[in-house]
Amino acid sequence: MIDSFNVIIPSAGNSSRFESDIPKQFQQLNGKLLINHSIDKFLGFKECKNIVIPISGEKSYEDQILFEDRVTLVTGGSSRAESVKLGFDYLFSIDSRLNVLIHDAARPCFQVEELIKFLKKFSSSDTVGAIFASPCTDTIKSSQSGKTIDATVERTYLWQAQTPQIFEYEALESIYKNFTGDLSLITDESSMFEESEYLISLFQSSNLNIKVTVKEDMELAQSIIKNTIKS
């Protein structure tokens, strides 16, 4: 069984590392906006009740975003985490207290079959949240200067956090109410739970769940999506 959920896809960023006038989430990928690939997949779930998309108020591409009754655009913040919080505030305003799934607009390649397993596992778990993640397999080096190696980091217990991430509404609401740090420094919502009593579970994702960060990533994303459609 999959419990009902709402989705927040923060999309207000300007994608500075992508080096384009058009943010990466609004780039064309296999005939449609990169963000629309994710929206499409979530809309395929009857359990998905709302998709909230925080966007920039300065330059809007809202007329190109896949739109239907379950999709709502809201004004985003100056950082990713602030945009997610504004999306959460919208859900609070409409009193929709379902599980909250947060997803990066720049991850269009997640597999629907994996998401189904993820949601089913979370629905039957005793944790308040779960995240897609991948164990580190490369040798990890630390370098304060960014030029020379300081040390090799033990990777045995290291995981790369990804999205989707899902949380019980009440737990996320509590975390926000008690959070005293700088929200602009938060790069993923699960990190806000780490000093709390709440437990967040890991779901090992496949290597197809890439994040588009630079232009070269678009070619790989295009290949993954083409092969997914064929299969």
Image (cartoon, helix red, strand yellow):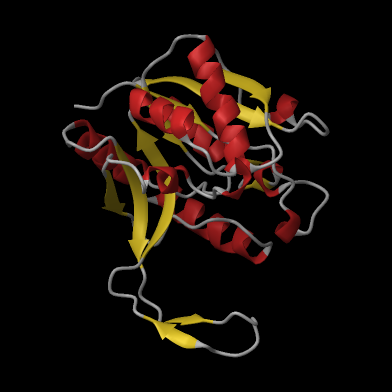
Residue at position x 65%, y 82% in the image: 145
Question: What x and y, as percent, mark residue 192?
Answer: 44, 44
Question: What x and y, as percent, mark residue 199?
Answer: 26, 43
Along the line of sight, which residue is nearer the eye, 170 or 59? Answer: 170
Res 100 visible: no
Along the line of sight, which residue is nearer the eye, 227 or 18? Answer: 18
Q: Is residue 142 above or below residue 187?
A: below
Q: Is residue 84 above or below residue 188?
A: above
Dividing the picture into quadrants, the one containing residue 58 is top right
Res 87 visible: yes
Residue 149 is left or right of residue 128, and the answer is right
Along the line of sight, which residue is nearer the eye, 225 or 89? Answer: 89
Dividing the picture into quadrants, the one containing residue 64 is top right
Along the line of sight, which residue is nearer the eye, 78 or 38? Answer: 78
Question: What x and y, as percent, mark residue 16?
Answer: 75, 55
Question: What x and y, as percent, mark residue 193?
Answer: 38, 43
Dividing the picture into quadrants, the one containing residue 31 is top right
Residue at position x 82%, y 34% in the image: 59
